[in-house]
Image (tube, grey):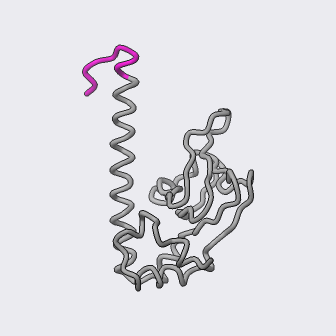
Amino acid sequence: MSILDMIGDIPMLKHFSEKDKEDFAKLDHSVQGFNNGDVIIKEGNAYTCLYLLIRGSISIIKTGYSTPLATLKAGSIFGEVSFLTKKPRKNNVIAVDNVLILKMDQSFFDKLPHEINDKIKNYLIELLGERLDAMNKALDKIARFAGISGLP
């Protein structure tokens, strides 16, 4: 199966034309495979790339904790905070099964047409907004559970 076939339903590409998807898929040299249990990102490392999970699933794990913070499936983006802030990674990312990821670093973005870069940027803004909203809702639940009211 080609990269183009695998990325067809990925949410990040929902506003891509077929030509955009073809241009995006041509950068298949950035595709990496990992096996079950492989460490994709190690907490504390200063990677400067963003990842798109094309196939399989991964767990986000904080050192010292046995329960994953999240399990992500194909189509998910990860590594966006460190990519944008250039700060070290806050968590480990472990392959749950055999996975394919697309590593998007600065050289990857330099090879894409500006229109595609803009569409990716717009998607990241949308994604971060959704994640911030979910975090605020979770904090509100925690505050109510702890009996704290009137958060500023």
Quarter of the image containing the N terminus? Answer: bottom right
Could you tell me which residue is drawn at 51 percent across and 55 percent down? 82
Q: Tell me if 40 is positioned left or right of 9 in this view.
A: right
Quarter of the image containing the C terminus? Answer: top left
Q: Tell me if 131 is positioned left or right of 48 in this view.
A: left
Give the magenta range: 143-152
Could you tell me which residue is drawn at 58 percent across and 69 percent down? 102
Give the percent coordinates (x, y) of residue 55: 60, 63
Q: Main secondary structure of the magenta part?
A: loop
Looking at the image, which is closer to me, 114 or 145? 145
Q: Residue 3: which quarter of the image?
A: bottom right
Residue 152 vertical placement versus 40 (above, below): above
Residue lying farthest to the top in this orientation:
147
Give the percent coordinates (x, y) of residue 91: 60, 45
Residue 57 vertical placement versus 27 (above, below): above
Q: Is residue 150 magenta?
A: yes
Looking at the image, which is closer to me, 11 or 60? 11
Give the percent coordinates (x, y) of residue 90: 57, 45
Could you tell me which residue is drawn at 39 percent across and 77 percent down? 116
Q: How many marks?
A: 0
Give the percent coordinates (x, y) of residue 53: 56, 62
Q: Is residue 127 magenta?
A: no
Q: Tell me if 124 is positioned left or right of 40 in this view.
A: left
